[in-house]
Image (tube, grey):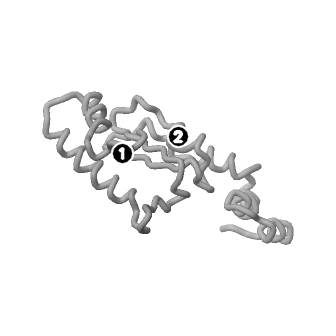
Amino acid sequence: RLTVDGSSVRQLLAAADTAQVTQATVCHTLDYDSAYTYAQINSPLRAIRDIQVPTLLVHADNDPIVPSEVGARAAPTDHPCLVTVATPYGGHLAFLDDEGASWADDLTVNFFKAHCRVTSTKTSSKTKADLLRRAPSFRGVVL
């Protein structure tokens, strides 16, 4: 349970970004020295080698909560079940196009459609990941 004392309330009121909010609340209560340390220790990338199902990891460089150096850019590139997408913009969960729709939704649907097409062929898992990366659905996206 998060608790907030006078010192963290002052930090919270002075916060200019989500890292500072995290520092004033989560880090203060759970005794992390910084929001960056909290993100590193609690990053799902720590367990990523154990993934055994097709996984699409989308991360924006301008994510105010998860720094890019612990996001998709830090993920392994040789994992047979993992495809990463790093984009300059998208915030933490926005990933919106010019009309306000989520382009990440389309990307996710296309990822799984491509996976279904690839898995219907007789290829190794390494080759499957390579085929997914070259699927037409992903053209123009940084993988």
Q: Position of residue 66 (x, y in %)?
A: 59, 51
Q: Position of residue 115 (x, y in %)?
A: 24, 44
Residue indicated by mark 2:
46
Q: Is residue 134 above or below residue 101?
A: above
Q: Is residue 57 above or below residue 6?
A: above
Circle 2 residues within 10 Å: few <14, some 14–19, many ≥20:
few
**In percent of the image, x 53 and y 40: which residue is there?**
46
- Callout in the foreground (2, 1): 1
Mark 2 and mark 1: Cα distance apart in space? 15 Å
Residue indicated by mark 1:
55
Q: Position of residue 119 (x, y in %)?
A: 18, 39
Badge number at residue 9: none
Q: Secondary structure at mark 1?
A: strand
- Looking at the image, which is closer to me, 78 or 135? 135
Q: Which kind of residue does numbered mark 2 sit on?
A: Arg
Q: Earlier in the sequence, mark 2 or mark 1?
A: 2
Q: Are marks 2 and 1 in contact (CB under 8 Å)?
A: no
